[in-house]
Amino acid sequence: MLELKDIYFSIEKNDEEVHLIDDASLKINPGHFMAIVGPSGCGKTTLLKLIAGLNVESKGNLYWNGRDLSEEGDLEPSEIGYVPQFSIAYELLTVEESVRSAIRLRVRGQGRAAFHDLLEKVLEDTGLTAIRGRPVRVLSGGQRRRLSLALELVTNPVLLLCDEVTSGLDPKSEQEVVKLLHQLSRDAGRIVINVTHSLANLDLYDSVLVLHEGKVVYHGQPRALEHYFSVTIAEDIYPRLAKRESSDWAQSWKKHRANYYEALDSAAQAVPQTAAVPQDGTITLSSAMPGFFVQFMTLLIRRWKLFLRDGGQLFLQIAILIGFPVLVVIFALDGIEPIKSLSESIAANPIEEANQQAEIFKNHLKTGGLISGLIMFQVILLTLMASNNSAREIAGERQIYEKERFGGLNPLSYLASKVAFLGFLVLVQSVWMAIFVQNICHLPTEDFGMHLALLLAVNAAMTAICLGISAMSKTAEQSSLLSVYLVGFQLPLSGAVLALPNYVEWITRPFISAYWAWSGGVSSLDSRTLSAVDNVVDTSLQASWLCLLVLCIHFAVGMFVAYVGVKKNRCL
Ligand SMILES: Nc1ncnc2c1ncn2[C@@H]1O[C@H](COP(=O)(O)OP(=O)(O)OP(=O)(O)O)[C@@H](O)[C@H]1O
Ligand SMILES: [Mg+2]
Protein backbone atom coordinates (compact mmCIF):
# COMPACT_ATOMS: atom_id res chain seq x y z
CA MET A 1 0.00 0.00 0.00
CA LEU A 2 1.13 3.53 -0.77
CA GLU A 3 0.27 6.15 1.81
CA LEU A 4 0.89 9.88 1.93
CA LYS A 5 0.39 11.54 5.31
CA ASP A 6 0.11 15.32 5.70
CA ILE A 7 2.51 16.00 2.85
CA TYR A 8 3.62 19.54 2.01
CA PHE A 9 5.88 20.67 -0.78
CA SER A 10 6.80 24.32 -0.36
CA ILE A 11 8.97 26.85 -2.14
CA GLU A 12 10.16 30.32 -1.17
CA LYS A 13 8.60 33.08 -3.24
CA ASN A 14 9.34 36.72 -2.40
CA ASP A 15 10.48 35.65 1.08
CA GLU A 16 7.20 33.86 1.62
CA GLU A 17 6.60 30.16 1.88
CA VAL A 18 4.25 28.95 -0.84
CA HIS A 19 2.78 25.46 -0.57
CA LEU A 20 2.65 23.88 -4.01
CA ILE A 21 1.29 20.78 -2.33
CA ASP A 22 -0.69 21.63 0.75
CA ASP A 23 -1.39 18.97 3.35
CA ALA A 24 -2.00 16.03 1.02
CA SER A 25 -3.04 12.72 2.58
CA LEU A 26 -4.09 9.64 0.65
CA LYS A 27 -3.90 5.87 0.57
CA ILE A 28 -3.75 3.50 -2.38
CA ASN A 29 -4.07 -0.27 -2.24
CA PRO A 30 -2.02 -2.69 -4.38
CA GLY A 31 -3.45 -3.39 -7.80
CA HIS A 32 -5.12 0.00 -7.86
CA PHE A 33 -5.52 2.32 -10.81
CA MET A 34 -5.82 5.98 -9.80
CA ALA A 35 -6.21 9.19 -11.78
CA ILE A 36 -4.95 12.53 -10.52
CA VAL A 37 -7.00 15.26 -12.16
CA GLY A 38 -7.23 18.99 -11.73
CA PRO A 39 -6.90 22.27 -13.61
CA SER A 40 -3.57 23.23 -15.17
CA GLY A 41 -1.00 24.37 -12.60
CA CYS A 42 -2.81 22.83 -9.61
CA GLY A 43 0.20 20.68 -8.69
CA LYS A 44 -0.46 17.31 -10.34
CA THR A 45 3.08 16.85 -11.68
CA THR A 46 4.51 18.13 -8.40
CA LEU A 47 2.54 15.51 -6.47
CA LEU A 48 3.58 12.74 -8.86
CA LYS A 49 7.24 13.74 -8.50
CA LEU A 50 6.87 13.67 -4.73
CA ILE A 51 5.62 10.10 -4.94
CA ALA A 52 8.45 9.21 -7.34
CA GLY A 53 11.05 10.73 -5.01
CA LEU A 54 12.03 13.35 -7.62
CA ASN A 55 10.70 16.09 -5.34
CA VAL A 56 11.49 15.95 -1.65
CA GLU A 57 8.57 16.75 0.65
CA SER A 58 8.98 19.75 2.98
CA LYS A 59 6.81 18.13 5.66
CA GLY A 60 4.90 14.89 6.13
CA ASN A 61 5.63 11.24 5.43
CA LEU A 62 5.34 8.75 2.59
CA TYR A 63 4.90 5.08 3.35
CA TRP A 64 5.28 2.05 1.11
CA ASN A 65 3.83 -1.10 2.68
CA GLY A 66 4.30 0.52 6.07
CA ARG A 67 7.93 1.51 5.34
CA ASP A 68 8.64 5.20 5.89
CA LEU A 69 10.23 6.28 2.62
CA SER A 70 11.28 9.66 4.03
CA GLU A 71 13.46 7.92 6.63
CA GLU A 72 14.32 4.54 5.17
CA GLY A 73 15.12 5.68 1.64
CA ASP A 74 13.17 5.76 -1.62
CA LEU A 75 12.00 2.76 -3.57
CA GLU A 76 14.63 1.05 -5.71
CA PRO A 77 14.86 2.40 -9.29
CA SER A 78 13.60 -0.96 -10.54
CA GLU A 79 10.52 -0.75 -8.33
CA ILE A 80 9.28 2.48 -9.88
CA GLY A 81 8.35 3.25 -13.45
CA TYR A 82 8.06 6.95 -14.18
CA VAL A 83 6.65 8.00 -17.53
CA PRO A 84 7.11 11.73 -18.06
CA GLN A 85 4.75 13.95 -20.01
CA PHE A 86 6.79 13.93 -23.21
CA SER A 87 7.86 10.72 -24.89
CA ILE A 88 11.55 10.21 -24.45
CA ALA A 89 13.30 7.79 -26.77
CA TYR A 90 15.95 7.89 -29.49
CA GLU A 91 14.27 8.66 -32.79
CA LEU A 92 16.77 6.57 -34.77
CA LEU A 93 16.30 3.33 -32.87
CA THR A 94 13.52 0.89 -33.59
CA VAL A 95 10.86 0.02 -31.03
CA GLU A 96 12.52 -3.31 -30.33
CA GLU A 97 16.01 -1.83 -30.04
CA SER A 98 14.71 0.74 -27.56
CA VAL A 99 13.17 -1.96 -25.38
CA ARG A 100 16.27 -4.15 -25.69
CA SER A 101 18.55 -1.37 -24.54
CA ALA A 102 16.19 -0.57 -21.62
CA ILE A 103 16.38 -4.22 -20.53
CA ARG A 104 20.18 -4.30 -20.77
CA LEU A 105 20.50 -1.06 -18.81
CA ARG A 106 18.00 -1.85 -16.09
CA VAL A 107 17.66 -5.59 -15.62
CA ARG A 108 20.46 -7.63 -14.14
CA GLY A 109 21.72 -11.06 -15.11
CA GLN A 110 19.36 -11.99 -17.92
CA GLY A 111 20.22 -15.24 -19.65
CA ARG A 112 19.40 -15.43 -23.36
CA ALA A 113 16.05 -17.19 -22.85
CA ALA A 114 14.94 -14.95 -19.96
CA PHE A 115 15.95 -11.85 -21.93
CA HIS A 116 13.92 -13.02 -24.90
CA ASP A 117 10.88 -13.88 -22.73
CA LEU A 118 10.97 -10.48 -21.06
CA LEU A 119 11.32 -8.67 -24.38
CA GLU A 120 8.37 -10.54 -25.86
CA LYS A 121 6.21 -10.04 -22.78
CA VAL A 122 6.83 -6.29 -22.63
CA LEU A 123 6.18 -5.84 -26.36
CA GLU A 124 3.03 -7.91 -26.13
CA ASP A 125 1.69 -6.25 -22.98
CA THR A 126 2.02 -2.84 -24.58
CA GLY A 127 0.67 -3.93 -27.96
CA LEU A 128 3.93 -3.14 -29.75
CA THR A 129 4.76 -6.58 -31.16
CA ALA A 130 3.40 -5.80 -34.62
CA ILE A 131 5.43 -2.60 -34.92
CA ARG A 132 8.61 -3.77 -33.19
CA GLY A 133 10.79 -3.10 -36.23
CA ARG A 134 9.54 0.44 -36.79
CA PRO A 135 11.85 3.39 -36.07
CA VAL A 136 10.68 5.59 -33.20
CA ARG A 137 10.64 8.67 -35.45
CA VAL A 138 7.70 7.34 -37.48
CA LEU A 139 5.53 6.33 -34.51
CA SER A 140 2.20 8.00 -33.84
CA GLY A 141 1.52 9.81 -30.55
CA GLY A 142 -0.30 6.83 -29.05
CA GLN A 143 2.42 4.38 -30.14
CA ARG A 144 5.08 6.61 -28.59
CA ARG A 145 3.21 6.63 -25.28
CA ARG A 146 2.99 2.86 -25.40
CA LEU A 147 6.72 2.68 -26.06
CA SER A 148 7.37 4.98 -23.07
CA LEU A 149 5.34 2.57 -20.97
CA ALA A 150 7.19 -0.44 -22.39
CA LEU A 151 10.53 1.11 -21.40
CA GLU A 152 9.27 1.34 -17.81
CA LEU A 153 7.77 -2.12 -17.71
CA VAL A 154 11.07 -3.90 -18.31
CA THR A 155 11.74 -3.99 -14.55
CA ASN A 156 8.19 -5.09 -13.75
CA PRO A 157 7.75 -2.12 -11.38
CA VAL A 158 5.36 -2.26 -8.44
CA LEU A 159 4.55 1.42 -8.84
CA LEU A 160 3.92 2.94 -12.26
CA LEU A 161 3.62 6.72 -12.38
CA CYS A 162 2.45 8.36 -15.59
CA ASP A 163 2.33 12.08 -16.27
CA GLU A 164 -0.18 13.09 -18.93
CA VAL A 165 0.54 10.07 -21.09
CA THR A 166 -2.77 10.61 -22.83
CA SER A 167 -2.51 14.33 -23.52
CA GLY A 168 -2.61 15.30 -27.16
CA LEU A 169 -4.09 11.98 -28.26
CA ASP A 170 -7.29 11.58 -30.21
CA PRO A 171 -10.18 10.13 -28.15
CA LYS A 172 -9.73 6.59 -29.50
CA SER A 173 -5.97 6.46 -28.80
CA GLU A 174 -6.57 8.05 -25.41
CA GLN A 175 -9.02 5.33 -24.51
CA GLU A 176 -6.63 2.64 -25.72
CA VAL A 177 -3.82 3.97 -23.54
CA VAL A 178 -6.07 4.29 -20.47
CA LYS A 179 -7.28 0.71 -21.04
CA LEU A 180 -3.68 -0.43 -21.25
CA LEU A 181 -2.85 1.33 -17.97
CA HIS A 182 -5.90 -0.28 -16.39
CA GLN A 183 -4.68 -3.66 -17.60
CA LEU A 184 -1.20 -3.01 -16.22
CA SER A 185 -2.63 -2.25 -12.78
CA ARG A 186 -4.16 -5.73 -12.77
CA ASP A 187 -0.70 -7.26 -13.15
CA ALA A 188 1.02 -8.48 -9.99
CA GLY A 189 -0.57 -5.95 -7.65
CA ARG A 190 0.97 -3.01 -9.41
CA ILE A 191 -0.24 0.47 -8.44
CA VAL A 192 -0.71 2.66 -11.51
CA ILE A 193 -1.19 6.41 -11.08
CA ASN A 194 -2.02 8.49 -14.10
CA VAL A 195 -1.99 12.28 -14.07
CA THR A 196 -4.43 13.68 -16.59
CA HIS A 197 -6.26 16.81 -17.59
CA SER A 198 -8.87 14.78 -19.29
CA LEU A 199 -12.07 13.85 -17.56
CA ALA A 200 -12.92 11.25 -20.20
CA ASN A 201 -12.69 7.51 -19.45
CA LEU A 202 -12.84 8.09 -15.70
CA ASP A 203 -14.93 4.96 -15.27
CA LEU A 204 -11.84 2.85 -16.10
CA TYR A 205 -10.10 4.03 -12.93
CA ASP A 206 -10.53 2.53 -9.48
CA SER A 207 -10.32 5.98 -7.93
CA VAL A 208 -9.93 9.61 -8.91
CA LEU A 209 -8.03 12.20 -6.90
CA VAL A 210 -8.97 15.80 -7.58
CA LEU A 211 -6.36 18.45 -6.84
CA HIS A 212 -7.15 22.14 -6.64
CA GLU A 213 -4.47 24.75 -5.93
CA GLY A 214 -2.21 22.11 -4.38
CA LYS A 215 -4.90 20.71 -2.11
CA VAL A 216 -6.63 17.34 -2.28
CA VAL A 217 -10.33 18.14 -2.63
CA TYR A 218 -11.58 14.66 -3.45
CA HIS A 219 -10.36 11.09 -3.65
CA GLY A 220 -12.83 8.36 -4.29
CA GLN A 221 -14.68 6.28 -6.79
CA PRO A 222 -15.23 7.87 -10.17
CA ARG A 223 -18.95 7.23 -10.14
CA ALA A 224 -19.37 9.30 -6.95
CA LEU A 225 -17.60 12.34 -8.47
CA GLU A 226 -20.61 14.03 -10.05
CA HIS A 227 -22.64 13.58 -6.90
CA TYR A 228 -19.85 14.91 -4.68
CA PHE A 229 -19.36 18.05 -6.74
CA SER A 230 -23.10 18.42 -7.50
CA VAL A 231 -22.61 18.41 -11.27
CA THR A 232 -24.33 16.38 -13.95
CA ILE A 233 -21.26 15.66 -16.10
CA ALA A 234 -17.62 15.32 -15.04
CA GLU A 235 -16.55 18.13 -17.43
CA ASP A 236 -18.38 20.62 -15.19
CA ILE A 237 -16.14 19.88 -12.21
CA TYR A 238 -13.40 22.41 -13.05
CA PRO A 239 -15.78 25.40 -13.41
CA ARG A 240 -17.46 24.23 -10.22
CA LEU A 241 -14.13 24.13 -8.35
CA ALA A 242 -13.46 27.76 -9.24
CA LYS A 243 -16.63 28.86 -7.46
CA ARG A 244 -15.29 28.14 -3.97
CA GLU A 245 -12.01 28.75 -2.18
CA SER A 246 -9.69 25.77 -2.43
CA SER A 247 -9.35 25.72 1.37
CA ASP A 248 -13.13 25.31 1.68
CA TRP A 249 -13.07 22.40 -0.75
CA ALA A 250 -10.18 20.82 1.13
CA GLN A 251 -11.95 21.28 4.45
CA SER A 252 -15.08 19.59 3.11
CA TRP A 253 -13.07 16.67 1.81
CA LYS A 254 -11.32 16.18 5.15
CA LYS A 255 -14.75 15.54 6.68
CA HIS A 256 -15.50 12.80 4.18
CA ARG A 257 -12.17 11.16 3.61
CA ALA A 258 -12.15 8.96 6.74
CA ASN A 259 -15.16 7.03 5.40
CA TYR A 260 -13.52 6.40 2.06
CA TYR A 261 -10.23 5.19 3.52
CA GLU A 262 -11.97 2.98 6.10
CA ALA A 263 -13.83 1.29 3.26
CA LEU A 264 -10.55 0.95 1.41
CA ASP A 265 -8.85 -0.64 4.43
CA SER A 266 -11.63 -3.20 4.83
CA ALA A 267 -11.43 -4.00 1.13
CA ALA A 268 -7.68 -4.57 1.50
CA GLN A 269 -8.20 -6.85 4.49
CA ALA A 270 -10.91 -8.81 2.69
CA VAL A 271 -8.42 -9.61 -0.11
CA PRO A 272 -5.20 -9.95 1.84
CA GLN A 273 -2.34 -9.14 -0.50
CA THR A 274 -3.65 -11.41 -3.25
CA ALA A 275 -2.93 -8.87 -5.87
CA ALA A 276 0.63 -8.47 -4.65
CA VAL A 277 1.39 -12.10 -5.40
CA PRO A 278 2.80 -12.55 -8.88
CA GLN A 279 0.35 -14.28 -11.16
CA ASP A 280 1.12 -16.90 -13.75
CA GLY A 281 3.06 -15.54 -16.65
CA THR A 282 4.46 -12.69 -14.61
CA ILE A 283 8.21 -12.40 -14.73
CA THR A 284 9.86 -11.79 -11.36
CA LEU A 285 13.09 -9.87 -11.49
CA SER A 286 15.91 -9.07 -9.14
CA SER A 287 15.94 -5.44 -8.04
CA ALA A 288 19.73 -5.15 -8.49
CA MET A 289 20.91 -3.07 -11.44
CA PRO A 290 23.33 -4.37 -14.09
CA GLY A 291 26.99 -3.64 -13.35
CA PHE A 292 29.20 -0.83 -14.65
CA PHE A 293 30.58 -2.76 -17.60
CA VAL A 294 27.24 -4.04 -18.93
CA GLN A 295 25.76 -0.53 -18.83
CA PHE A 296 28.92 0.92 -20.39
CA MET A 297 28.92 -1.55 -23.29
CA THR A 298 25.17 -1.14 -23.87
CA LEU A 299 25.55 2.63 -24.07
CA LEU A 300 28.65 2.46 -26.26
CA ILE A 301 27.08 0.09 -28.76
CA ARG A 302 23.92 2.19 -28.81
CA ARG A 303 25.97 5.37 -29.37
CA TRP A 304 27.73 3.85 -32.38
CA LYS A 305 24.43 2.67 -33.80
CA LEU A 306 22.96 6.16 -33.47
CA PHE A 307 26.09 7.73 -34.96
CA LEU A 308 26.10 5.45 -38.00
CA ARG A 309 22.37 5.98 -38.57
CA ASP A 310 22.49 9.76 -38.38
CA GLY A 311 23.29 10.52 -42.02
CA GLY A 312 23.84 14.26 -41.49
CA GLN A 313 26.20 13.81 -38.57
CA LEU A 314 28.11 11.02 -40.30
CA PHE A 315 28.52 13.06 -43.47
CA LEU A 316 29.74 16.08 -41.50
CA GLN A 317 32.26 13.98 -39.57
CA ILE A 318 33.66 12.38 -42.73
CA ALA A 319 33.69 15.73 -44.55
CA ILE A 320 35.70 17.46 -41.84
CA LEU A 321 37.91 14.44 -41.27
CA ILE A 322 39.00 14.52 -44.91
CA GLY A 323 38.43 18.18 -45.68
CA PHE A 324 40.30 19.85 -42.84
CA PRO A 325 43.73 18.25 -43.44
CA VAL A 326 43.29 18.95 -47.17
CA LEU A 327 42.56 22.59 -46.32
CA VAL A 328 45.81 22.82 -44.35
CA VAL A 329 47.76 21.38 -47.26
CA ILE A 330 46.13 23.70 -49.81
CA PHE A 331 47.28 26.73 -47.81
CA ALA A 332 50.79 25.29 -47.67
CA LEU A 333 51.06 24.34 -51.35
CA ASP A 334 53.02 27.42 -52.42
CA GLY A 335 55.42 27.12 -49.56
CA ILE A 336 56.15 23.42 -49.59
CA GLU A 337 59.38 23.78 -51.59
CA PRO A 338 60.95 26.36 -49.24
CA ILE A 339 60.03 24.14 -46.30
CA LYS A 340 61.73 21.19 -47.92
CA SER A 341 64.86 23.18 -48.83
CA LEU A 342 65.38 25.40 -45.87
CA SER A 343 69.10 25.17 -46.51
CA GLU A 344 71.89 27.63 -46.95
CA SER A 345 74.13 27.36 -50.00
CA ILE A 346 77.68 28.72 -50.00
CA ALA A 347 78.38 31.50 -52.48
CA ALA A 348 81.65 32.02 -54.36
CA ASN A 349 82.36 35.71 -53.58
CA PRO A 350 81.53 38.08 -50.68
CA ILE A 351 79.05 40.28 -52.62
CA GLU A 352 77.20 37.30 -53.91
CA GLU A 353 77.37 35.80 -50.42
CA ALA A 354 75.88 38.97 -48.90
CA ASN A 355 73.10 38.94 -51.49
CA GLN A 356 72.50 35.29 -50.82
CA GLN A 357 72.44 35.87 -47.05
CA ALA A 358 69.77 38.56 -47.51
CA GLU A 359 67.79 36.25 -49.77
CA ILE A 360 68.16 33.40 -47.29
CA PHE A 361 67.04 35.64 -44.44
CA LYS A 362 63.99 36.73 -46.43
CA ASN A 363 63.23 33.08 -47.19
CA HIS A 364 63.70 32.20 -43.55
CA LEU A 365 61.15 34.78 -42.50
CA LYS A 366 58.68 33.63 -45.12
CA THR A 367 59.15 29.97 -44.32
CA GLY A 368 59.11 30.57 -40.57
CA GLY A 369 55.79 32.39 -40.89
CA LEU A 370 54.40 29.65 -43.09
CA ILE A 371 55.39 26.82 -40.76
CA SER A 372 54.09 28.63 -37.69
CA GLY A 373 50.83 29.29 -39.55
CA LEU A 374 50.58 25.68 -40.70
CA ILE A 375 50.93 24.33 -37.18
CA MET A 376 48.41 26.85 -35.85
CA PHE A 377 46.02 25.98 -38.68
CA GLN A 378 46.25 22.29 -37.79
CA VAL A 379 45.60 23.11 -34.16
CA ILE A 380 42.64 25.42 -34.80
CA LEU A 381 40.96 22.98 -37.17
CA LEU A 382 41.37 20.22 -34.60
CA THR A 383 39.77 22.40 -31.91
CA LEU A 384 36.90 23.02 -34.32
CA MET A 385 36.54 19.26 -34.79
CA ALA A 386 36.62 18.89 -31.01
CA SER A 387 33.71 21.26 -30.50
CA ASN A 388 31.79 19.47 -33.25
CA ASN A 389 32.54 16.16 -31.50
CA SER A 390 31.16 16.89 -28.10
CA ALA A 391 29.23 20.18 -27.80
CA ARG A 392 25.85 18.48 -28.15
CA GLU A 393 26.88 15.07 -26.88
CA ILE A 394 25.28 15.28 -23.43
CA ALA A 395 23.10 18.40 -23.65
CA GLY A 396 21.36 17.01 -26.75
CA GLU A 397 20.14 13.91 -24.92
CA ARG A 398 19.88 15.24 -21.39
CA GLN A 399 16.25 14.27 -20.90
CA ILE A 400 16.88 10.70 -22.00
CA TYR A 401 19.93 10.53 -19.75
CA GLU A 402 18.00 11.88 -16.74
CA LYS A 403 15.25 9.39 -17.37
CA GLU A 404 17.70 6.50 -17.58
CA ARG A 405 19.58 7.73 -14.53
CA PHE A 406 16.34 7.82 -12.56
CA GLY A 407 15.87 4.25 -13.77
CA GLY A 408 19.21 3.22 -12.25
CA LEU A 409 21.86 4.11 -14.85
CA ASN A 410 25.27 4.70 -13.27
CA PRO A 411 26.56 8.19 -14.29
CA LEU A 412 30.08 6.80 -14.47
CA SER A 413 29.06 4.16 -17.02
CA TYR A 414 27.46 6.93 -19.01
CA LEU A 415 30.52 9.17 -18.89
CA ALA A 416 32.86 6.26 -19.68
CA SER A 417 30.80 5.42 -22.76
CA LYS A 418 31.16 9.02 -23.94
CA VAL A 419 34.92 8.94 -23.36
CA ALA A 420 35.27 5.70 -25.33
CA PHE A 421 33.16 6.96 -28.22
CA LEU A 422 34.72 10.41 -28.42
CA GLY A 423 38.20 8.99 -27.78
CA PHE A 424 37.96 7.01 -30.98
CA LEU A 425 36.91 10.08 -32.99
CA VAL A 426 39.72 12.15 -31.45
CA LEU A 427 42.29 9.48 -32.23
CA VAL A 428 41.29 9.10 -35.87
CA GLN A 429 41.00 12.85 -36.46
CA SER A 430 44.33 13.75 -34.87
CA VAL A 431 46.41 10.93 -36.29
CA TRP A 432 45.01 11.45 -39.77
CA MET A 433 45.58 15.21 -39.58
CA ALA A 434 49.20 14.80 -38.41
CA ILE A 435 50.19 12.06 -40.87
CA PHE A 436 48.43 13.52 -43.92
CA VAL A 437 49.92 16.99 -43.47
CA GLN A 438 53.36 15.62 -42.63
CA ASN A 439 53.47 13.41 -45.70
CA ILE A 440 52.75 16.27 -48.03
CA CYS A 441 54.30 19.29 -46.33
CA HIS A 442 57.29 17.63 -44.64
CA LEU A 443 57.30 19.90 -41.61
CA PRO A 444 60.90 19.96 -40.42
CA THR A 445 60.09 18.55 -37.01
CA GLU A 446 62.74 16.89 -34.90
CA ASP A 447 60.26 14.78 -33.03
CA PHE A 448 57.20 13.78 -35.04
CA GLY A 449 55.95 11.68 -32.11
CA MET A 450 55.77 14.82 -29.96
CA HIS A 451 54.07 16.75 -32.76
CA LEU A 452 51.48 13.99 -33.06
CA ALA A 453 51.03 13.77 -29.28
CA LEU A 454 50.39 17.52 -29.08
CA LEU A 455 47.75 17.41 -31.81
CA LEU A 456 46.12 14.46 -30.08
CA ALA A 457 46.26 16.25 -26.74
CA VAL A 458 44.74 19.50 -27.99
CA ASN A 459 41.89 17.65 -29.68
CA ALA A 460 41.31 15.53 -26.57
CA ALA A 461 41.51 18.56 -24.26
CA MET A 462 39.02 20.63 -26.28
CA THR A 463 36.72 17.63 -26.74
CA ALA A 464 36.76 17.11 -22.96
CA ILE A 465 36.15 20.81 -22.26
CA CYS A 466 33.25 20.96 -24.72
CA LEU A 467 31.90 17.75 -23.16
CA GLY A 468 32.10 19.53 -19.80
CA ILE A 469 30.20 22.49 -21.24
CA SER A 470 27.67 20.07 -22.71
CA ALA A 471 27.17 18.37 -19.33
CA MET A 472 26.67 21.71 -17.56
CA SER A 473 24.42 23.37 -20.16
CA LYS A 474 20.66 23.45 -19.99
CA THR A 475 20.16 23.03 -23.73
CA ALA A 476 22.12 21.76 -26.71
CA GLU A 477 21.87 25.22 -28.32
CA GLN A 478 23.45 26.89 -25.31
CA SER A 479 26.22 24.32 -25.24
CA SER A 480 26.94 24.64 -28.98
CA LEU A 481 27.09 28.41 -28.75
CA LEU A 482 29.48 28.39 -25.80
CA SER A 483 31.71 25.82 -27.47
CA VAL A 484 31.85 27.81 -30.70
CA TYR A 485 32.82 30.95 -28.78
CA LEU A 486 35.49 28.99 -26.95
CA VAL A 487 37.00 27.79 -30.22
CA GLY A 488 36.58 31.21 -31.82
CA PHE A 489 38.67 32.85 -29.12
CA GLN A 490 41.52 30.32 -29.40
CA LEU A 491 43.17 31.90 -32.42
CA PRO A 492 43.27 35.58 -31.36
CA LEU A 493 44.15 34.76 -27.77
CA SER A 494 46.90 32.29 -28.68
CA GLY A 495 49.21 35.17 -29.67
CA ALA A 496 50.39 33.15 -32.66
CA VAL A 497 49.08 35.63 -35.19
CA LEU A 498 49.28 38.95 -33.38
CA ALA A 499 51.11 39.37 -30.12
CA LEU A 500 48.85 40.29 -27.19
CA PRO A 501 49.59 42.97 -24.59
CA ASN A 502 51.72 41.38 -21.89
CA TYR A 503 49.18 41.58 -19.08
CA VAL A 504 46.42 40.06 -21.26
CA GLU A 505 48.78 37.33 -22.34
CA TRP A 506 49.57 36.29 -18.80
CA ILE A 507 45.92 36.18 -17.80
CA THR A 508 44.61 34.30 -20.81
CA ARG A 509 47.53 32.08 -21.74
CA PRO A 510 47.03 29.30 -19.18
CA PHE A 511 43.54 28.66 -20.53
CA ILE A 512 44.20 28.74 -24.26
CA SER A 513 44.75 25.15 -25.38
CA ALA A 514 45.61 26.24 -28.92
CA TYR A 515 48.56 28.32 -27.65
CA TRP A 516 50.08 25.31 -25.88
CA ALA A 517 49.58 22.96 -28.80
CA TRP A 518 51.04 25.49 -31.24
CA SER A 519 53.91 26.50 -28.99
CA GLY A 520 54.80 22.85 -28.27
CA GLY A 521 54.55 22.01 -31.97
CA VAL A 522 56.89 24.85 -32.92
CA SER A 523 59.34 23.89 -30.18
CA SER A 524 59.59 20.38 -31.58
CA LEU A 525 60.84 21.74 -34.95
CA ASP A 526 64.51 21.44 -35.87
CA SER A 527 66.70 24.23 -34.55
CA ARG A 528 67.06 26.16 -37.83
CA THR A 529 63.33 26.20 -38.48
CA LEU A 530 62.69 27.07 -34.86
CA SER A 531 64.93 30.15 -35.16
CA ALA A 532 63.13 31.08 -38.38
CA VAL A 533 59.77 30.92 -36.57
CA ASP A 534 61.23 32.80 -33.61
CA ASN A 535 62.09 35.65 -35.99
CA VAL A 536 58.50 36.09 -37.12
CA VAL A 537 56.55 35.68 -33.88
CA ASP A 538 56.72 37.97 -30.86
CA THR A 539 55.15 35.44 -28.54
CA SER A 540 57.41 33.39 -26.31
CA LEU A 541 57.57 29.65 -26.89
CA GLN A 542 57.50 26.88 -24.30
CA ALA A 543 59.14 23.48 -24.16
CA SER A 544 57.13 20.75 -25.85
CA TRP A 545 56.87 18.54 -22.76
CA LEU A 546 55.50 21.47 -20.73
CA CYS A 547 52.89 22.14 -23.42
CA LEU A 548 51.86 18.51 -23.42
CA LEU A 549 51.51 18.61 -19.65
CA VAL A 550 49.33 21.74 -19.74
CA LEU A 551 47.09 20.13 -22.38
CA CYS A 552 46.76 17.04 -20.18
CA ILE A 553 45.66 19.35 -17.35
CA HIS A 554 43.09 20.97 -19.66
CA PHE A 555 41.82 17.49 -20.50
CA ALA A 556 41.56 16.56 -16.83
CA VAL A 557 39.68 19.80 -16.03
CA GLY A 558 37.26 19.14 -18.91
CA MET A 559 36.63 15.60 -17.67
CA PHE A 560 36.12 16.79 -14.12
CA VAL A 561 33.55 19.38 -15.23
CA ALA A 562 31.83 16.72 -17.34
CA TYR A 563 31.73 14.42 -14.31
CA VAL A 564 30.21 17.15 -12.12
CA GLY A 565 27.75 17.90 -14.92
CA VAL A 566 26.51 14.34 -15.28
CA LYS A 567 26.17 13.97 -11.51
CA LYS A 568 24.14 17.16 -11.33
CA ASN A 569 20.37 16.72 -11.08
CA ARG A 570 18.34 18.21 -13.86
CA CYS A 571 14.59 18.29 -13.97
CA LEU A 572 12.94 15.34 -15.56
N1 LIG B 1 10.35 23.66 -8.40
C1 LIG B 1 9.42 24.62 -8.55
N2 LIG B 1 9.69 25.90 -8.24
C2 LIG B 1 8.78 26.86 -8.38
N3 LIG B 1 7.53 26.65 -8.84
C3 LIG B 1 7.20 25.40 -9.20
C4 LIG B 1 8.12 24.32 -9.06
N4 LIG B 1 7.51 23.20 -9.48
C5 LIG B 1 6.27 23.57 -9.84
N5 LIG B 1 6.08 24.89 -9.67
C6 LIG B 1 4.83 25.63 -9.88
O1 LIG B 1 3.85 24.92 -9.19
C7 LIG B 1 2.62 24.94 -9.88
C8 LIG B 1 2.15 23.52 -10.11
O2 LIG B 1 2.96 22.92 -11.11
P1 LIG B 1 2.67 21.49 -11.71
O3 LIG B 1 3.65 21.28 -12.80
O4 LIG B 1 2.66 20.50 -10.63
O5 LIG B 1 1.23 21.70 -12.29
P2 LIG B 1 0.30 20.68 -13.07
O6 LIG B 1 -0.95 20.53 -12.30
O7 LIG B 1 1.06 19.46 -13.39
O8 LIG B 1 0.01 21.52 -14.38
P3 LIG B 1 -0.24 21.00 -15.88
O9 LIG B 1 -1.57 20.35 -15.88
O10 LIG B 1 -0.24 22.25 -16.67
O11 LIG B 1 0.86 20.06 -16.21
C9 LIG B 1 2.87 25.71 -11.14
O12 LIG B 1 2.42 27.03 -10.94
C10 LIG B 1 4.36 25.66 -11.32
O13 LIG B 1 4.82 26.79 -11.97
MG1 LIG C 1 1.86 18.63 -15.18
Image (cartoon, helix red, strand yellow):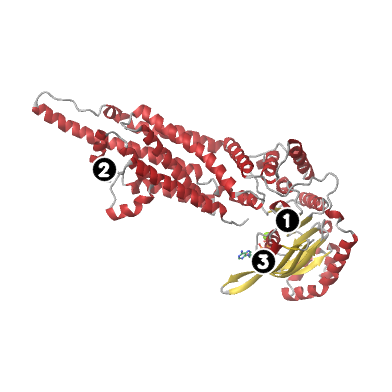
Q: Amino acid at mark 2?
A: Val
Q: Position of residue 52 (x, y in %)?
A: 69, 58
Give the residue at x 54% y 40%: 420
Q: Secondary structure at mark 2?
A: loop
> Distance of mark 3 from mark 2, alpha carbons?
62 Å
Specify the quadrant of the image occupied by residue 248. bottom right
* Disc on the earlier residue, 1 or 2: 1
Which residue in the protein does label 1 denote?
A: 161
Q: Are marks 1 and 2 in contact (CB under 8 Å)?
A: no
Q: Give the labeled residue for mark 3.
A: 57
137 lies left or right of 324: right
The nearer-to-camera label among 3 and 2 is 3
Mark number for residue 537?
Answer: 2
Of labels 3 and 1, the one closer to you = 3
Pick whichever of labels 3 and 1 is earlier in the sequence.
3
Please state, as top left, top right, bottom left or bottom right, where the N terminus lies in the image.
Answer: bottom right
